[in-house]
Amino acid sequence: MYSRSDPAIAARRRQLASGPLAAFKAFSDSVFADGGLPAKTKQLIAVAVAHVIQCSYCIRHTAAALKSGATGEEIRRSGSRPRCVLARRMHIRRWHSTRTRRIWV
């Protein structure tokens, strides 16, 4: 779904869009800084969201969570619950779609 990032792509991005890239980095740094919630909690939330939306780029918040002081167990827990929610949602959609087909067909 997403192309893999590599150093050449990152260098090209810095060359072509250094302003937007710097603005996004500043925005991201301010979002994940300590504030109303500790940085560790924010990173764990980002890991959970990454699992729900299944974004390969967002999964990288795992390393940031570790750097912020999260343990492996906390990261596992933040990733396992959203997967259960996602599986349940997919099951409900599948059940609903088969049920409505039977009603209308």
Image: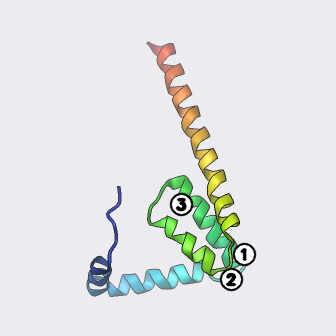
The quadrant in which residue 57 appears is: bottom left
What is the three-letter code of the residue carrying label 2?
Asp
Residue 21 occupies quadrant: bottom left
**In which quadrant will I find the N terminus?**
bottom left
Q: Which residue is mark 2?
A: 34
Q: Secondary structure at mark 1?
A: loop
Question: In the picture provided, is 46 more to the left or to the right than 71?
Answer: left
Q: Which mark is residue 53?
A: none
Question: Residue 93: x and y, percent?
Answer: 54, 33
Report if the CB atoms under discs 1 and 2 are less than 8 Å apart: yes
- Residue at the spot 65% in from the left edge and 65% down from the top edge: 75
The residue identified by callout 3 is: 50
The mark lying in front, picked from 3 and 2, is: 3
- The residue labelled by disc 1 is 37
Dot 3: few (<14), some (14–19), or many (≥20) neighbours within 10 Å?
many
Q: Amino acid at mark 1?
A: Leu
40 vs 93, nearest the viewer: 40
Coloring basis for residues? rainbow
The residue depicted at 58 percent of the width and 83 percent of the height is 30
Q: In 3D space, how far apart are the residues under numbered discs 3 and 1 (Cα atoms)? A: 19 Å
Circle 3 sits in a helix, a strand or a loop, which is it? helix
Residue type, numbered disc 3: Ala
Q: Is residue 76 left or right of residue 12?
A: right
Separation of marks 3 and 2 at Cα, in angstroms: 20 Å
